[in-house]
Image (cartoon, helix red, strand yellow):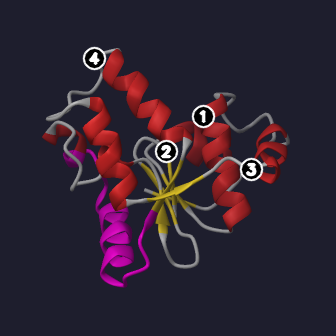
Amino acid sequence: MTCSTPRFHQRNGAAFGDPSGHPHSRVASSAAEKISKKARTAIEDARRSGQGIAISDIALLEISILEREARIQLNSSLETFLSEIEARFIVLPITGRICVRAVSLPASYPNDPGDRIIGATALVEGVPLITADEGMRRSQVLRTIW
């Protein structure tokens, strides 16, 4: 699965997303409470099956910006938190193929570059996107879970 905030994506059965909303993250507990039951189940199923959860590397930047702007509160330093994410998740790099797909998404898809990279990553990997983002879900450009 691929994910926005929170977003996850399935890659060969592995989930993909933004760990800022993951129940095992050290973001303030209110973030974990915002994950839908379907999303939580998809994440737990991916973990139980041993397939892992992946995130787009741009999610690390998004988390860093959210923390800097005090929109999320971490229970550790930002660097420690990001290191924990890198240890717990498969971090998928932005590739040329993903960039081409991101700029070719239709106008109905949100214009935010991070959202476009995350969506394009899900499309390139052939997996659904776990996301709370209404714009991404409403676009119907890719399969989403929420």
Query: How many residues crowd around disc 3 within 10 Å: few (fewer than 14), some, or many (20 or more)?
Result: few
Q: Assign a secondary structure to mark 3.
A: loop
Would residue 126 be seen by someone viewing this image from the given angle?
yes
- Labels 1 and 3: the sequence-earlier one: 3
Q: Which image quadrant is residue 73 in?
A: top left
- Labels 1 and 4: the sequence-earlier one: 4
Q: Which image quadrant is residue 34 in?
A: top left
- The residue to which callout 4 is attached is 70
State which mark lies toward you, 1 or 2.
Answer: 1
- The residue to which callout 1 is attached is 114
Q: Distance between the residues labelled 1 and 2?
A: 9 Å
Q: Residue 22, which numbered label?
A: none
Q: Tell me if label 1 and label 4 are in contact, CB under 8 Å.
A: no
Q: In this view, does 18 lie to the left or right of 110?
A: left
State which mark lies toward you, 2 or 3.
Answer: 3
Q: In this view, does 77 lie to the left or right of 42?
A: left
* Magenta region: 32-53
Q: Distance between the residues labelled 1 and 3?
A: 14 Å
Whether the magenta-drawn stretch holds residue 67 is answered as: no
